[in-house]
Image (cartoon, grey):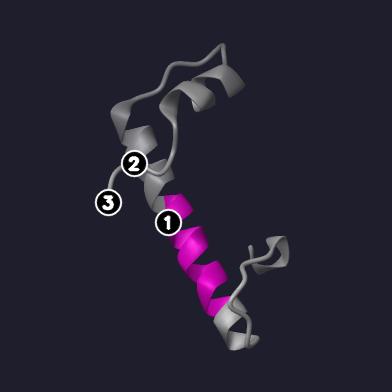
Amino acid sequence: MGPLVVKSKIRELVEDMRFSEEFFEALDEKVAQLVEEAVKRAKGNGRATLRACDL
């Protein structure tokens, strides 16, 4: 799977900082982890739809 995070959008969000490539790799991992946990929570509640509350 490719990157989950759009680097240019993160750079727009934080204009006064520089980013290492490791930051984006770690951010992608964190996003993937959050989504996986949300899927488990939704399935545990008998739903096939992810909601904000699953995060």
Direction from residue 43 to residue 7 in the image, left or right:
left
Q: Which residue is mark 3?
A: 1
Direction from residue 2 to residue 5 in the image, left or right:
right
Disc on res. 18: none
The kind of residue on which mark 3 rests is Met
Q: Position of residue 15 (x, y in %)?
A: 57, 13
The kind of residue on which mark 2 rests is Pro
Q: In this rendering, is residue 7 above or below 29?
A: above
Residue closer to the observer: 18 or 4: 4
C-alpha distance separating marks 2 and 3:
7 Å
Q: Is residue 28 magenta?
A: no
C-alpha distance separating marks 3 and 1:
11 Å
Q: Quadrant of residue 46?
A: bottom right
Q: Secondary structure at mark 3?
A: loop
Report the magenta stretch's main SS: helix
Q: Earlier in the sequence, mark 3 or mark 1?
A: 3
- The 10 Å Cα crowd at callout 2, few under 14, some 14 to 19, many 20 or more, is few
Direction from residue 21 to residue 32 in the image, left or right:
right
Q: Earlier in the sequence, mark 1 or mark 2?
A: 2
The residue at the point 51 percent across, 16 percent down is 17
Q: Secondary structure at mark 1?
A: helix
Magenta span of residues: 30-41
Q: Quadrant of the C terminus?
A: bottom right
- The 10 Å Cα crowd at callout 3, few under 14, some 14 to 19, many 20 or more, is few
Q: Which residue is mark 1?
A: 32
Q: Position of residue 31 (x, y in %)?
A: 47, 51
Q: Are marks 2 and 3 in contact (CB under 8 Å)?
A: no
The residue at the point 31 percent across, 35 percent down is 22
Q: Secondary structure at mark 2?
A: loop
Q: Which residue is mark 2?
A: 3
The kind of residue on which mark 1 rests is Ala
